[in-house]
Image: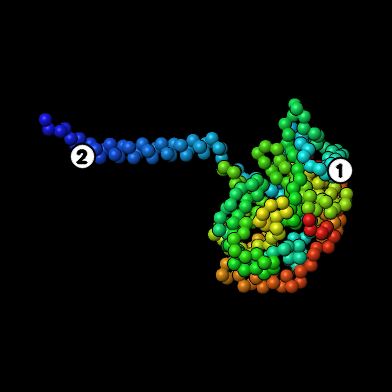
Amino acid sequence: MPKKLVPRWLLARYVVAAILLSVIAVAGTILTQRLLEGPAETFAIEPSYAFDVTHLPYLAGYADNVSIARVTGIASVQPPQTVYTLDVQQSLKGSLSGQVTVRQDGYRSGNDVWVDTDQPQLAVGGTYLLVTNPVLDGDGHVLLGGSAASVPLTDLTRTVVVSRYQRAIADQEYPPRVPPKA
Amino acid sequence: MRRCRRLVPIVAIGWAVLSPQPAFAHYLGYDSVDSGEIRYKDQTQWDDARANAISSWNDLAAGVYVALDTASTVADLEFKDYSANDTKCGKYANNSGADDAWANNAFYNGYGQRDRRACTLHELGHAHGLAHSYNDEAMDDCPVSGCLGGSSYIVPQVHDRNDYYNLW
């Protein structure tokens, strides 16, 4: 008895139908998930400062470390903060080197995003000049507040930014009327 | 008399241009107020600063009342503490549920009563929807004595009150 073979054109139709169904199923799952999570919302974190964080010699005087580093990834999200992994390329103040972690206010949870109103979130892959202190009750470092504590660097701006912070470090001063660091 | 009539529109236009305008940038566009109330949960150790902030804002003659959350109410705000040498005496976070008013132990431990009260007063100002605004007032983005003006206000000042009354 000769075997009854499925014609090739019919087989091709089955394959195409299976692919289409899979695509519809995956898209449906993603869409349902998005609908359940609701639309993306942005929430603000408003920082209040203990001294003038735009005054670079004060900022440098309060910081243990001023470094140039590339953001290599996100280690974890610990609301209200994101913990980033960094590769330190150069240390202008302090002795940071190699792989370190830095916490920054702001995080993403599902579709929703929390942002520090004075400081854009670090971008993975970006290179920055970062002003930090060690974390008090754990590992790693914490990014200081204000836009001057996190400056994105490009080949064009790097020299100018670095020399401005080197001057600030030379003139650094612990901010007056601020309690000693914990 | 005719000269006076001519002067009226000039004075009106001059007043419109020179008088203080409603400063929309002084408002966050969000707040912790729910039906005229801020119901709070108390998770801070800085009770004196919290109590001063609540009574100072409640003393203003307007419609927002700050009170402790109860079993029959929904919390709108949580007073919390954290510890970091991050330059911030405190911070306010807007959330989909209860918002957060944080006090930074790293500074509060070294502060006197006045600076602790000033920073918590400022955070509760955010919960009322007030943004950072005038220098050397309670809603200055640097509200404690380590800042440029060197003042730390433990009650809302003139512009803080005006912004509050405009909003509520």
- Furthest toward the top, the residue is B72
Residue visible at 59% across and 64% down?
A98
Give residue B39's mark: none
Determine which quarter of the picture holds residue A178: bottom right
Position of the N terminus of chain A, as image quadrant, is top left
* Residue A146 in sight in this render: no
**A8 left or right of A74 in image:** left
Q: Residue furthest left?
A: A1
Q: Position of residue A127 (x, y in %)?
A: 58, 63
Which is nearer the eye, B161 or B9?
A: B161
Is A16 left, or right, of A78 in this rendering? Answer: left
Residue at 54%, 35% (x, y): give it.
A36
Q: Position of residue B152 (x, y in %)?
A: 86, 53
Mark number displayed over residue B48: 1
Provide the secondary structure element on which disc 1 rests. helix
**Is B108 left, or right, of A65 in this rendering?**
right
Amino acid type, callout 2: Arg
| Location of the C terminus of chain A (image quadrant) | bottom right
Q: Secondary structure at mark 2?
A: helix
Q: What is the three-letter code of the residue carrying label 1?
A: Asp
Q: Chain of mark 1?
A: B
Q: Measured along the vertical axis of the image, is residue A33 above or below residue B114?
A: above
Residue to which mark 2 is pinned: A8
Classed neighbour count for the residue bearing mark 1: other residues with Cα under 10 Å, few (<14), some (14–19), many (≥20): few
On the same chain: label 2 and label 1? no
Q: Position of residue B86 (x, y in %)?
A: 73, 56
Q: Count the marks: how many? A: 2
- Residue A162: % across, % down: 65, 70
Q: What's the chain of the residue with tag 2?
A: A
Residue B42 at least partly seen: yes
Disc 2 versus disc 1: distance between alpha carbons? 82 Å
